Amino acid sequence: MNNSPTVLQINSKAIRHNLQYFRSKLKTSTKLLVIIKAFAYGSDPVAVAKLLTSEKVDYLAVADTQEGVVLRKTGIDLPIIVLHSQAENFEWLVEHNLEPDLYNFESFISFYKLIKSKGLKDYPVHIKLNTGMNRLGFKPFELDKLRQIITNQNYLKIRSVYSHLAASEDPEERKFTLQQIDLYKKMYDQLTESLTYKPLKHISNTSGILNYPEAHFDMVRLGIGFYGFGNNKTETAKLKNVCNLISKISQIQELEKGETVSYNRRFVVKEKSKVAVIPLGYADGISRGLSNGKGYVIINRKKAFITGAVCMDIFMVDVSNIDCKTGDKVIIFDHQQQILDFAKQLKTIPYEIITSISQRVRRDFI
């Protein structure tokens, strides 16, 4: 049993609010896929998947087979796409009724041969197209060959043909994004023209949902927006923060002028001070880049800035001007703005902050 004073609270009301907000942007005929890879963006994938099942979303997506298997073993029966499926795990994937993303000829042929050897029919798969992201996917010149392979066979059923927008959150890249959408539509038509059915069409991520309603097509993929972040401050303000990271003060040190704090004596006390010790560190996802005043927490409604270097399991904050005691609540973050502040200091994005919270931190689904 984990009775740690540090806990990541996952707020189901916030999840439902965000889900409803994005559903309000869609036509009733547009399906909704929610991304729960990377431990559901650092939260709790099983608890989140169960809530999404009750909310009747259409699809879930994970990054790898292992993430999907965990969900299956806990009773999640929604369709699950494995976004970066690997041939080494295809047997395991099929055993747990997961749906692979096939993004090159090697992966497609390998999976086709496996399904054929098992005598299965119409196994659902997803085809990834490369329209400019240049990570995974078939390029335009490969489509004629791919179309010949997928036509007139009944071992694989192409459940969807999709692509990924590279810069849908950036107004300055609107021309490029529209080019991606246009290319995707042409590639989709070229690939599927010989099929007797129409696979689902989807390209929109969170920012695509918000900025390009003309590209919602048959389904959209909701990622960071589900967890409380839009593509600008206005949109983020309409969402609710899903995860709150809370801890307690372990000890308060009273220090005299000239004393130092933490490793390498990186902070020298300039005047008599009080420092509170917080029981989590960089092994829990609190970056060392937040050391020496770059990061802060909230104690009794006041900001307490990090003092000295963040340690592996502990960091310290200056509470000289805060009335507090051992055992008092410490809010590392409970609002999007705090996460955005951390991201700005670290020159990164909110995704990295929330997905970095270690699995040793206790999760509470509230």
Image: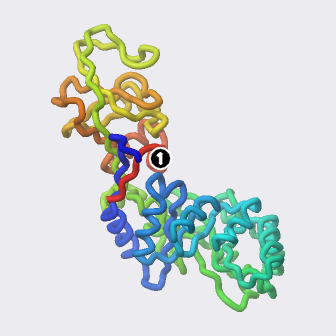
**Residue 175 vertical position relative to residue 188 in the rendered view, above or below:** above
Residue closer to the observer: 189 or 38 = 38
Q: From the viewer's perspective, is residue 28 above or below residue 272? A: below
Q: Can residue 232 be seen?
A: yes
Task: Determine the residue located farthest toward the top in the rendered image.
Answer: 258
Q: Quadrant of the C terminus?
A: bottom left
Q: Tell me residue 7's x, y (percent).
A: 36, 46
Farthest residue, direction left: 323
**Amino acid, disc 1:** Ile
Task: Pick whichever, 357 or 250, lies toward us.
Answer: 250
Query: Residue at left 60%, top 80%?
Result: 200
- What residue is at 65 percent from the left and 86 percent from the top? 198
Q: Which residue is mark 1?
A: 349
Choose top left, top right, bottom left or bottom right for residue 256.
top left
Note whether residue 215 is visible: no
How did the renderer colour the structure?
rainbow
Q: Residues within 10 Å of mark 1 (few under 14, many from 20)?
A: some
- The quadrant where residue 252 appears: top left
Residue 361 in percent (x, y) is at 42, 44
- Disc 1 secondary structure class: loop
Residue 314 vertical placement versus 29 (above, below): above
- Whether 145 is drawn above or below 46: the answer is below
Residue at image coords 46%, 43%:
360
Determine the residue positioned at 19% across, 38% down: 300
In the rendered image, residue 139, in percent from the top left (x then y), is placed at: 75, 66
- Judge from the rendering whether residue 207 lies leftward or rightward of residue 200; answer left or right: left
Image position, residue 240 (x, y; %): 32, 59
